[in-house]
Image (cartoon, helix red, strand yellow):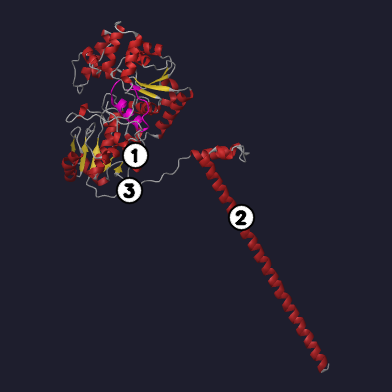
Amino acid sequence: MCKTDKFLYHRKLWEMKVRLLGETKVDKLRSSFVSRSRMSLWMIRAVTVLLLWSCFVHLMALGEMWGPRLFKGWPSCFSQHDLSAVAEMRSLPAKIALPPKRVYENNGYLMVSCNGGLNQMRAAICDMVTVARFMNVTLVVPELDKTSFWNDPSEFKDIFDVDHFITSLRDEVRILKELPPRVKKRVELGMYHAMPPISWSNMSYYQNQILPLVKKHKVLHLNKTDSRLANNGLPVEVQKLRCRVNFNGLKFTPQIEELGRRVVSILREKGPFLVLHLRYEMDMLAFSGCSHGCNPEEEEELTRMRYAYPWWKEKVINSEVKRKEGLCPLTPEETALTLTALGIDRNVQLYIAAGEIYGGERRMKALTDAFPNVVRKETLLDSSDLDFCRNHSSQMAALDYLVAVESDIFVPTNDGNMARVVEGHRRFLGFKKTIQLNRKFLVKLIDEYTEGLLTWDVFSSMVKAFHSTRMGSPKRRLVIPNKPKEEDYFYANPQECLQLLDEPLRVI
């Protein structure tokens, strides 16, 4: 081969190599381009999906805000199964942000034993939480009364949601279910101080006399707690904390709350309902000595019961004198006349919030004749629904409390703890109608009517006129210096905590 041919041969060989290398680079470039295109397409799809999901979430939020009006007429894209699943998810309890724990130097531990019925203990618990907070001490979950007339073995956790009680108030006071082990050991060895505090005391009493005892003994046990904090003359922050504990911190157990909602739902389906706290039970009549309308055998039975309880101090009682002073609960007959005179619709559902009425159906006849739709929790629910709280008077009272707070009208026939605490709760909920009966005025009027001294129209008009300003509307608490027992009860009218209506406050 000549040089020229060799040159041409090598040149063609070189051109072929260059061509081959060029095609490889082109293939690489083509492959790189395809890969980048696929990546871009994937990114576009991902962003699109995110944007669509964001729009969907916002639309759902608008739906929650505006309700069915926004989507009215839109075809549903959910099956019945899907809707059920959504409903089930919504029924799950929402996570509630807990308040931050209050940090403070602990001055010691406070144990309290409440006395009395449910609402007497409820008010005492509110007072003791407040006292603990302003003494900077740790409170142990209160012990409930198990030795009173009702002999109810219920613990705090059987009536109230103890975890909610502790966590909802943790920014104010540290509450423990039980003492720490080392402190509990001290108590078991008797290294603590026990005493009943003085009734109707102000905060200076707790700061100046009780707090030094806590610091000295490390553990203080207050063994009687009803009415130990004054009605009036306390700082506003003290009064507001009492309200916070009462209306927010003290929730009944989920089981009691659910049953209460069910009773209210059953009543609401049939229309308006009035809750009558008919305190005409054997223990109340024996304790008060009120036996108006009872036969001789019943009077004797009530007297025996009064003497059977040594801590009931008053033994010899003139029933008629006490009745005329307005210190007896209204009888079922007197209650029927009063409600009719007030113009209560005879077809309204009358829910009896009470235990067993003394005298049974015989004494209830006048009331059921006047108001045929008389109901009780026992008649609205299946017997099995009440099994968990049967023979537990405080749990049964808790159920009545829930229904009473939700009723269209609440009428107590005696000025007891439940009547007053429910009245205050209804004021807190917007001054719901609560008829505060004046028993002294009523029994005088009823006697005159039954003796023929008044016509029905005159009797009815007088009852209506007298009670027109006693319907739970805004008013100032009555303050009587040096006579706290005669003042208006704080828990019946916690005025420092109420959102007053346009109606001006007035003294009644």
Residue under the point 45% across and 40% down: 93
Write down the residue under mark 1: 165
Q: Nearer the viewer, residue 315 or 1?
A: 315
The residue depicted at 61 percent of the width and 55 percent of the height is 48
Type of residue at label 1? Phe
On residue 101, which mark appears? 3
Q: Tell me which label, 3 or 1, sits earlier in the chain.
A: 3
> Which amino acid type corresponds to the residue marked 3 in the rendered image?
Lys
Q: Position of residue 235 (x, y in %)?
A: 24, 40
- How much space separates mark 2 and mark 3, taking CA atoms? 44 Å
Q: Secondary structure at mark 1?
A: helix
> Disc 2 or disc 3, which is closer to the eye?
2
Is 151 contained in the magenta span?
A: no
Position above or below: 66 against 490: below
Q: Quadrant of the N terminus?
A: bottom right
Q: Residue 232 in the image: x percent, y percent? A: 23, 34
Please state the extent of the stretch shown in magenta in the rendering. 411-435
